[in-house]
Amino acid sequence: MTSRWSFPVRIAAALAAAAGTVLLGAPPAAAHSVLVSSSPAAGASVAAGPAEAVLEFNEPVENRFTELSVLGPDGASHWEAGPVSVVDARVSAPLRPLGPAGTYAIRYRVTSADGHPVSGTVVFRLTVAGPGAALPAVAAVAPPGDEPVPLWPWITGGAVLLGTGFAVARRLSRVDA
Ligand SMILES: [Cu+2]
């Protein structure tokens, strides 16, 4: 997901807009969208990893700049199984089977109905280790084709070429004889 404006720029813009509203004495603008519930719930302890992480807001949010990630107890591993989806006030993402027991964090950033970004973190606890394993970081970030090239095809190919060359040379010399 890419943002046209960096997060700090949009925060600055939001603050500037808010300051402008105050200075002009306009009535208070509509409040930002607020997270009202989640699954798993904030602070919940669950014995099994949920199939998805769900966030419910107090009003439909815009489907722009939406981010939802679930970080593992190590604070770095990701456990989302697919892209985030936004349906009205419901923001969700499918999850892989969770792994180590411990604290997982649902990190989100959505765009309020009033256009302002809202972000936060919901923490829950997995009490029983699940079958999932963290994706190896190297494999996850390595671009395709970056693996070391095996040598044996070259050696085999060279031997075959060499053998063919000898055979051809022998046949040619026989014809000449
Ligand atoms: Cu707002």
Image (spheres, helix red, strand yellow):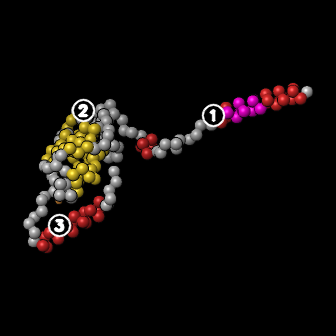
Lower position in the chain sequence, tag 2 or tag 1: 2
Question: Which sits earlier in the primary sequence, circle 2 or circle 3?
Answer: 3
Answer left or right for 104 relative to 113.
right
Q: Does the magenta portion include 129?
A: no
Image-quarter location of ligand 1:
bottom left
For residue 149, which quarter of the picture? top right
Mark 3 vs ligand 1: CB below 8 Å: yes
Is residue 154 visible in this depiction of the protein? yes
| Residue beneath the point at 8% across and 66% down | 27
Label 2 sits on a secondary structure element that is loop
Q: Which residues are magenta?
A: 157-165
Q: How many dots with numbers?
A: 3
The secondary element bearing badge 3 is classed as: helix
To which residue does mark 2 refer? 48
- Measured as percent of width and height from the top left, residue 147 is found at 53, 41
Tell me the residue that label 3 is attached to: 18
Q: Is residue 24 above or below residue 135?
A: below
Q: Is residue 164 magenta?
A: yes
C-alpha gap between disc 1 and disc 3: 65 Å
Q: Which residue is mark 1?
A: 153
